[in-house]
Image (cartoon, rainbow, N blue to C red):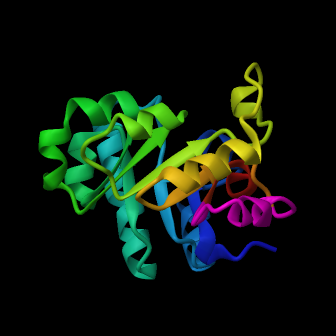
Amino acid sequence: MFDYSKIVCVTNRKLVQGDFLKKIDQICSLGVRSIILREKDLPLDEYLSLTKNVLKICKNYNVPLFAHNSFEAGKITGNLHLSYDKFINILDKIKDYDNVGVSVHSIREIEDLEIMPNYFLVGHIFSTDCKKDLPPRGLKFLEEICKISPVPVYGIGGINESNYKSVLEAGASACGVMSGLMK
């Protein structure tokens, strides 16, 4: 079983059987570290509406909610998770948010940054259905990132109850989990 305080839930409502908001409530009740609302296919107005509804649930459990790649939704939550490319293009605006996380896929991306986010989400560590055509980067890669990162690192990709401890042992502060929580 997960130590949920070490788990960052990354959403994908298409994996949920049943009511998505009820699933969010259930996940928050487990005591997850935070939630990244990663619903890339939604038009902005629908994403903003969903953000407000999920934020109400998160607040009930004191679970931070991070908007994914949406500056507008990030202003609602106070927290923003960005792709590396988006992050490097808005460095002057990150002070507008309480917390900013960034997805990275190489040591060079971290080394090239002059301004650091609050955390890095690094992956994919293990094989995952989300990235079927790409080989996983593995625990050694994660360990190397953790050694050079000046901020906490969260591993993501194919993480489940049987392998998440190895991600933490490699130096990650937390694990990003999608399928294991959404299904």
Q: In the picture shown, does residue 150 fall above or below 92? A: below
Residue sitting farthest toward the top = 133
Q: 93 or 152: which is nearer to us?
A: 152
| Residue 169 pos. (x, y %) | 73, 66
Q: 93 or 143: which is nearer to us?
A: 143
Q: Is residue 23 left or right of residue 97?
A: right
Q: 10 or 21: which is nearer to us?
A: 10
Say if residue 10 shows up in the picture.
no
Q: 108 or 23: which is nearer to us?
A: 108
Residue sitting farthest toward the right = 162
Q: In the picture shown, does residue 89 fall above or below 79? A: above
Q: In the picture shown, does residue 59 fall above or below 171? A: below
Quadrant of the image occupied by residue 154: bottom right
| Residue 136 pos. (x, y %) | 75, 33
Q: Which residues are magenta?
A: 161-174
Q: Residue at x 52, y 56 (%)?
A: 153
Quadrant of the image occupied by residue 42: top left
The stretch drawn in magenta includes residue 30: no
| Residue 17 pos. (x, y %) | 71, 50
Say if residue 141 shows up in the picture.
yes
| Residue 71 pos. (x, y %) | 23, 41
Q: Residue at x 26, y 50 (%)?
A: 74
The stretch drawn in magenta includes residue 166: yes
Q: Is residue 130 left or right of residue 148?
A: right
Q: Is residue 92 left or right of residue 7?
A: left
Q: Residue at x 82, y 74 (%)?
A: 1
